[in-house]
Image: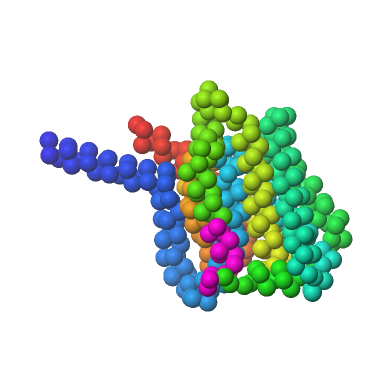
Amino acid sequence: MTGMDDGAIRARAGADLLRWVVGGDGLAILAVILLAIASVVLAPSSLTGAALYAMMPFAAILGIAAIGQQLVIQQRGLDLSAGGIISLVCVLATYQLPDAASATDVLGRCVLAIVIATAAGAINGLLIVRLNIAPLVTTIGMNAILMGFVLWLSNGIPGNAPDLLDHFALGRTFGLPNTVLGVLIVTLLAAVALGRTITGRRFVLSGTNKAAARAAGIRTDRYEIGSYVVAAFCYAVAGILLAGLLNVPNLNVGQTYLLATVASVVIGGNSLAGGRASPVATVIGAVFMTQLGQMLIAAGLERSVQYLLQGAIVIVGSSIHAIVPRWIGR
């Protein structure tokens, strides 16, 4: 009997551990620990203080964009227009603005970029919800349209970020890089909104069980459309910071964020089938993805390896979320 009891206890402990990995922040924390070990073995130079400090702003920008992607995925959607929005915002934030542009001009251009980005997000949401067009088809099409605008507006020539935007993206506030402060603010707002407000709880219920939400009188279509709008806002903020950080952003720079945002959400332990998700875990996932790229570069591997691993992470992470809960439930 004691042996059977011990076996049952171990089985329960194993199931609890798997449940923590799949259902909470465990997957993100475990992934970062394993990556740190791999970095020590393969590329210890990627873990120096200088390397980590250089990585932080890029991880923060990816984290902001990934939180936007997370909101869409929570509503059982997928936003593949993230890259086009970020690229277009980078162009709008730099196009024909002199280095000495005034604060009013820079702020006005950033506001314009945010308005255009959120309009694109609203169009995505309306097409998906009102016309019942698949998210994959809608957002891929929107991404292509936005990249067309990028090439038309820039005439194929990237612009320079004005000095004020450059200084802001590279600056510090309260001892923290402004990019890191930005992701902390966005993460806090998202966590509080989703976990502590009525609107946030309805949003989560809408993504977790749409039928139950509708039975409770919740307008699920509004939350689904809203997720694309807020996501586009997050992409726009990320694009503005990225333009200032890079100074001369490549016209295709946003496309590197397309798969990276999805992978960050998956690494954060969030299911692509929608439902509950943790903004904190998503940001940890973004740190993982950024450090992964830095480790591969320091190890002398091609960037193509990074894309291969990003795709593998999405596939394996999605499989974990699909298989493990059914295994635990047996």
At 67% from the left and 50% from the top, the residue drawn is: 233
The reply to whether residue 294 is visible in this rendering is no
At 41% from the left and 55% from the top, the residue drawn is: 30
The reply to whether residue 68 is visible in this rendering is yes
The answer to whether residue 85 is left or right of residue 290 is right
**Residue at the outermost top position:** 215
Relative image position of residue 53 (x, y in whole percent) = 53, 72
- The kind of secondary structure the magenta stretch mainly shows is helix
Relative image position of residue 95 (x, y in whole percent) = 82, 63
Residue nearest the observer in this picture, 20 or 173: 173
Residue nearest the observer in this picture, 111 or 96: 111
Relative image position of residue 224 (x, y in whole percent) = 62, 36
At 17% from the left and 38% from the top, the residue drawn is: 5
**Membership of 48 in magenta stretch:** no
**Part of the protein shown in magenta:** 174-185
Q: Residue 113's image quarter?
A: bottom right
Q: Dividing the image into 4 quarters, which one contains the N terminus?
A: top left
Relative image position of residue 205 (x, y in whole percent) = 51, 34
